Amino acid sequence: MTLTRKQLLKAMAGAGAAVMVTPQAHASSGRVIQRDVCVIGGGASGSYAAVRLRDLGRSVVVVEREDRLGGHTETFRDPVTGGTADIGVVGYHDIPLVRRHFGRFDVPLSFAKTNPGTIRFADYRTGLPVDNYRMPPMSRLAEYAEVLEQYPYLEDGPDLPNPVPPELVAPFTDLMAKHGFADLAPLLYLVSQGRSDLFDLPALYEMKYLNGPAVHGMLTQTTVTTSRRDNSELYEKITTHLGDDVLLNATVTEVSRERAGVQVLVSTPHGPRTIRARRLVVTVPPLLANLARFDLDSTERALFSRFSPGGYYTSVLRLPGVAQVPIQNVSADAARQHMPTMPGLYLLAATGIPEIFIAYYGSSRPLPEARVRADILAALGRLQSTGVLPTTQPRFEMFASHAPFLLSVSGRDIAGGFYRRLSALQGRHNTFYTGAAFHTNDSTLLWRFTESLLPRI
Ligand SMILES: Cc1cc2nc3c(=O)[nH]c(=O)nc-3n(C[C@H](O)[C@H](O)[C@H](O)COP(=O)(O)OP(=O)(O)OC[C@H]3O[C@@H](n4cnc5c(N)ncnc54)[C@H](O)[C@@H]3O)c2cc1C
């Protein structure tokens, strides 16, 4: 007898032991992996969820499409000096959860330097230095922090009051103008990053990203980072800890969810796998294209189709002869609050490794890698033509695309209850969601949010 998928899942329900599957039932599905929870995506949220679920006695498996865990956490290791530089996630908030998570994997933390200190300014559009610009002092973030205090729930998750406060729905530029700190724009952008139209988006996004704990960490210089300047060490140790419970280079080929449980078909370098689990935890960007193999229902489809992704790219450049001082892109035009023209390169950050800089490039939409690389080289050429940079040959040592980055919806959608409906998806079809799209691009807050979901999972 060949069981239908529904019958198989029913058989699974309540059964602690592995379900025997007839070869005919899933002829192409390969080995069967039976777990309590299947986690899709092994970045900050997925790897945290897996570790903590295992702590709580659940069996897990993580499906990650890349060859490593960590997602937006990525580290450059210089073959010449042995120095390291994090080109993705750098800092965390100093809360007990963070100390515990790093501590258990023996990854020591130290306070990070969040004050940019000495910095040069140039208009990357013309290549000319902007010598008369002065970055507002970090202490002025206190003015912004006062506004944030009115919205403490932004730190907790996607839930918003009903009705949503109009200030959160209107563009962030309006909020800056209303509260009299429009001139902070380049500073706020420098410490927020990643999406060129960030300030034109509903203020909700910037206020969740540059949130209360983040600003507190900057004002008190208590943001933490790994002492060895290698955030990837955490994820390498989690990979070892999870062992066979991580499937790397794995592609989801089909997800079907029934009341009794979920089934995930995965293609791996070691052949196909069939994962049967009671719960699914989705941590990947929930764009329709990324969930194409999921059995999404019309509600899920309608919600996920509203998201617009941005682009964000970081690369490691070797710039011979360039001193280790950051160079920030600011417009010479004071009437534009010195905001640079984007999409484009907006910062060459010093790493402390001789000749090595991190190039940060933001865009309101994903762009082809070739276009980003060409833009970066063109901007460097302009900076060389004006003498801001010496005319030495730049070299890409590493290129990382973080697109799709910061999934946003319109102010109208937010006011119409988008995040309330998104939140209501938790638990439907045995599926739970965490990850940046459901909260914000902040590892600490994502871990806290994920932790709050665990009892339900
Ligand atoms: C350059 C940069 C700097 C940042 N700096 C900081 C910082 O200093 N501090 C901070 O707190 N936050 C920072 N962030 C924000 C960062 O996005 C979050 O901290 C956090 O890493 C997001 O975690 P996540 O789990 O949502 O996503 P990710 O870490 O991106 O994890 C998602 C994972 O899912 C995988 N995946 C995607 N699609 C699929 C699929 N279909 N199947 C299987 N796997 C899939 C991806 O490969 C990835 O591993 C930074 C982000 C960037 C890009």
Image (cartoon, grey):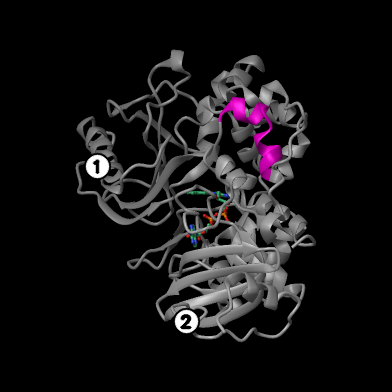
424 lies above or below 165? below
- Mark 1 vs mark 2: which is more N-terminal? 2
Q: In the shown orientation, is residue 311 left or right of residue 235? A: left
Q: Name the residue under label 2.
A: 30
Of 39 and 218, which appears nearest the observer?
A: 39
Q: Three-letter amino acid code at disc 1? A: Ala
Image side of residue 209 versus residue 127, left or right = right
Q: Is residue 335 above or below residue 96?
A: above
> Is residue 377 visible to us here?
yes
Q: What element carries label 2?
A: loop
Residue 179 as seen in the image, left or right of residue 361:
right
Disc 1, SS: helix
Q: Is residue 411 magenta?
A: yes
Residue at 19% across / 42% down in the picture? 391
* Magenta residues, start to end: 410-422
Residue 18 on the magenta span = no
Q: Examine the image and state in which quarter residue 178 appears.
A: top right
Disc 1 target residue: 374
Give 279 or 333, whichever is nearer the viewer: 279
Quarter residue 182 falls in: top right
Residue 372 appears at what percent x and percent y? 31, 43
Q: Where is residue 107 in the image (x, y as percent from the top left)?
A: 62, 69
